[in-house]
């Protein structure tokens, strides 16, 4: 209840404009500080000591009370200084497939002195603790489950510390507007896409298959006996294995209408598998979705573009 009240008060007081332009420096007006439960208990003990010292006129009691109070004040200052003037900027966020975990990375820099036990967290999530040195930045990777495809937003982050003794909780907020692309989970049972050429020529590229003899390679344990080049072995050569190949069309279109599935989400999973498999085979391929047509190409950038289009289908154009 206390944490919820503190969160509500901070939400009302601190309303940052999102997204914020990096880097963000935690200046004095951005940092809040309140006692923790242990801090309130510590204050209660000091009050009891003070009343007992007044009632019994204990000089040593006054000395102990004010010494502990001074130590509490120093602890509050050090807790605040552990966040003051920290610099934060967003790190790289890698796309993932549905069902995996996105890691939102925040880079922390301490320009003047080391900081210890600095934590970052999303609302109602477990914190990630890092120590920030002056020699090089520290990176805090916040794991967030990604159960569905689409754009997963990081939302506002809380950065806090209770260092050094845990009597005070100092915190601030930062919102860089981070988001991650979550690709549809590939349907591994979808098989290979239908081969259809639109290149206007008969040229193709070799892909693994069983139609034509391709080459001989060194034997690998587990190769089927029928693939072993027995004639070469009889001539005294090393143990070799025959490889066969098929000829695929130079360009392939991965079409929404060709993905036979019971619902749109299942079609997207089929197309995601086709994109990965076609890229693995080295073919040039294009992607057709309702309202979207990506021309044939290949490479990591093209694969990422196609998977992003699948991830954001029905949610707007790819970023």
Image (cartoon, rainbow, N blue to C red):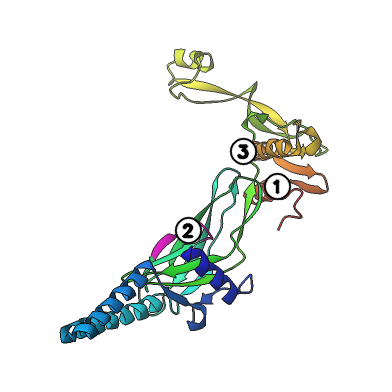
Residue under numbered circle 3: 280
Q: Is residue 222 above or below residue 74?
A: above
Residue depicted at 70% across the width and 47% down the height: 306
The picture places residue 194, in percent across and down from the top left corner, at 75, 30
Q: Which mark is residue 141?
A: 2
Foreground of the two, 9 or 136: 9
Chain-order first, disc 2 or disc 1 = 2
Mark 2 vs mark 3, CA separation in Å: 30 Å
Q: Are marks 2 and 1 in contact (CB under 8 Å)?
A: no
Q: Which residue is mark 1?
A: 306
Left or right? Give the position of 30 relative to 274: left
On the question of residue 186 being in view, the answer is: yes
| Side (left or right) of 260 relative to 178 | right
Position of residue 106 in the picture relative to residue 180 (left or right): left
The secondary structure that most of the magenta stretch takes on is loop
Labels 2 & 3 near each other (Cβ < 8 A): no
Which residue is at the front of the view, 176 or 273? 176
Q: CA distance from mark 1 to mark 3?
A: 14 Å
- 2 vs 1, front mark: 2
Counting from the top left corner in percent of width and height, residue 134 is at 37, 74
- Is 128 within the magenta? yes
Question: Counting other residues with Cα less than 10 Å from the Cα at mark 2, is it few (<14), some (14-19), or many (20 or more)?
Answer: many
Residue located 53% across and 60% down the image? 122
> What stretch of residues is rendered in magenta?
122-130
- 28 in relation to 149, above or below: below
Question: How much space separates mark 2 and mark 1, taking CA atoms?
Answer: 27 Å
């Amino acid at each position: 209840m206390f944490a919820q009240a503190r969160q509500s008060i901070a939400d009302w007081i601190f309303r940052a404009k999102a997204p914020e332009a990096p880097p963000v420096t935690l200046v004095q007006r951005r940092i809040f500080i309140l006692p923790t439960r242990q801090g309130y208990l510590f204050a209660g003990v000091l009050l009891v000591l003070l009343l007992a010292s007044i009632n019994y006129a204990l000089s040593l009691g006054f000395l102990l009370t004010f010494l502990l109070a001074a130590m509490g004040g120093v602890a509050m200052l050090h807790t605040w200084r552990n966040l003051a003037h920290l610099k934060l900027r967003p790190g790289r966020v890698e796309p993932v497939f549905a069902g995996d975990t996105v890691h939102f990375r925040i880079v922390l820099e301490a320009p003047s002195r080391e900081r210890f036990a600095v934590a970052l967290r999303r609302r109602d999530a477990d914190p990630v603790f890092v120590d920030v040195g002056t020699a090089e930045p520290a990176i805090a990777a916040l794991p967030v489950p990604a159960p569905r495809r689409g754009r997963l937003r990081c939302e506002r982050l809380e950065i806090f510390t209770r260092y050094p003794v845990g009597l005070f909780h100092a915190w601030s907020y930062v919102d860089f507007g981070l988001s991650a692309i979550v690709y549809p989970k590939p349907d591994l049972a979808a098989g290979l896409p239908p081969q259809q050429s639109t290149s206007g020529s008969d040229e193709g590229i070799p892909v693994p298959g069983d139609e034509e003899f391709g080459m001989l390679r060194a034997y690998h344990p587990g190769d089927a006996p029928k693939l072993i080049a027995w004639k070469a072995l009889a001539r005294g050569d090393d143990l070799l294995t025959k490889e066969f190949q098929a000829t695929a069309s130079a360009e392939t279109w991965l079409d929404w209408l060709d993905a036979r599935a019971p619902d749109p989400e299942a079609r997207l999973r089929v197309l995601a598998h086709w994109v990965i498999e076609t890229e693995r085979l080295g073919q040039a391929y294009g992607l057709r979705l309702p309202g979207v047509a990506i021309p044939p190409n290949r490479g990591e950038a093209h694969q990422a573009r196609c998977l992003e289009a699948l991830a954001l289908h029905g949610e707007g154009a790819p970023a």
